[in-house]
Image: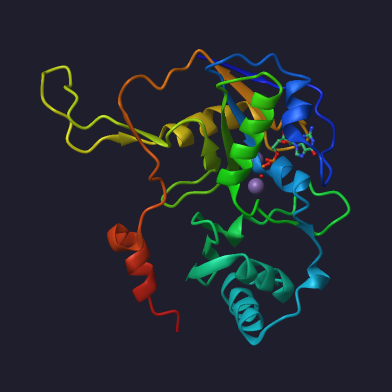
């Protein structure tokens, strides 16, 4: 498996056609996986916003005040308001905001970024990253680049461990995970529970190549990796009914 960043992409602006910009700079082949950082997908989709466009509700003010008293640092209540506007459920209220975004991904601050956003205060995640991935894939097909899978990624923290890593927000052209259940291990014992989240693993690998700062390499071509003939599944985000952590957070008393 090889990972190669797409070189020389410009600063992305609202309305830019990412499929075209990438197709002009990368030699894509059938079977490749293309990862694209959500940051540039959001920029192309015009998801940059300013704090002043978020009039503060009582709830946002309360959250900002609580975070300030718990974490000791001032939280702009307009930022809390932006997070609420992008979310369907608030799971942790302090010392940081953990929410479910409107498209079902759970992350801190609804994934709103303040880095790599020129001329605006904030960059929201793409509205529907799966549709963004599909649009890029279709755009590539229209340019004769057939059978390229696309993953829209973000850098995300995780519970229990320090450090952030790449995750998949949306994907097209491949299943999210690969089901090893029923496959034998080396002793012939059947695997009972292993479902491998390949889109996250590819996103993490690609994120090593994109970097997090000023590198300017938001897109990566993954070559010579094959999904294989295991069953695929598109279930990545847990349903509430089988998400014990979410259920526990719902019952937590925030005081
Ligand atoms: P995120 O992980 O999706 O939140 O994105 P990051 O802010 O970590 O950026 C990922 C990569 O994309 C880094 O290499 C950035 O330098 C690069 N990047 C961000 N915005 C742009 C842009 O508009 N144009 C180009 N060429 N690179 C960008
Ligand atoms: Mn991000
Ligand atoms: Mn990143």
Q: Relative to 125, say whether 165 is above or below.
A: above
On screen, residue 115 versus residue 192, left or right, reads: right
Residue 94: x, y in percent? 53, 71
**Residue positioned 29% across, 63% down in the render:** 241
Residue 254: x, y in percent? 45, 79
Residue 228: x, y in percent? 36, 19
The tally of labels here is: 0
**Residue positioned 35% across, 62% down in the render:** 240
Q: Where on the picture, by quarter, is residue 110?
A: bottom right
Q: Relative to 217, say whether 72 is above or below.
A: below
**Residue positioned 28% across, 58% down in the render:** 242
Q: Residue furthest bottom?
A: 58
**Residue positioned 66% across, 34% down in the render:** 136
- Along the line of sight, which residue is nearer the eye, 126 or 99? 126
- Along the line of sight, which residue is nearer the eye, 132 or 111? 132
**Residue 73 visible from this viewpoint:** no
Q: Relative to 137, say whether 84 is above or below.
A: below
Q: Where on the picture, by quarter, is residue 217?
A: top right
Q: Which residue lies furthest to the right in this view?
A: 119
- Along the line of sight, which residue is nearer the eye, 206 or 9? 9
On screen, residue 55 versus residue 58, left or right, reads: right
On screen, residue 149 versus residue 216, left or right, reads: left
Quadrant occupied by the C terminus = bottom left
């Amino acid at each position: 498996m090889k990972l190669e960043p797409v070189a020389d992409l410009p600063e992305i602006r609202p309305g830019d056609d990412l499929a075209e910009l990438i197709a002009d700079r990368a030699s894509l082949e059938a079977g490749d996986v293309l990862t694209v950082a959500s940051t540039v997908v959001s920029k192309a989709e015009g998801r940059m916003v300013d704090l002043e466009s978020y009039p503060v509700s009582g709830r946002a003010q309360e959250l900002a005040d609580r975070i300030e008293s718990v974490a000791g640092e001032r939280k702009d209540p307009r930022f809390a308001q932006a997070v609420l506007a992008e979310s369907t459920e608030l799971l942790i209220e302090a010392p940081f905001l953990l929410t479910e975004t409107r498209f079902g991904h759970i992350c801190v601050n609804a994934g709103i970024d303040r880095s790599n956003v020129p001329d605006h205060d904030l960059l929201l995640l793409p509205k529907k990253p799966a549709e963004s991935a599909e649009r890029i894939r279709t755009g590539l097909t229209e340019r004769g680049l057939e059978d390229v899978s696309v993953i829209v990624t973000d850098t995300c923290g995780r519970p229990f461990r320090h450090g952030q890593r790449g995750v998949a927000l949306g994907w097209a052209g491949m299943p999210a995970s690969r089901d090893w259940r029923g496959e034998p291990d080396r002793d012939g014992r059947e695997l009972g529970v292993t479902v491998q989240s390949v889109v996250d693993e590819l996103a993490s690998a690609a994120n090593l190549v994109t970097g997090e700062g000023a590198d300017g390499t938001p897109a990566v071509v993954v070559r010579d990796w094959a999904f294989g003939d295991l069953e695929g599944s598109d279930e990545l985000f847990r349903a509430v009914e089988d998400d014990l952590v979410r259920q526990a957070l719902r019952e937590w008393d925030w005081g």
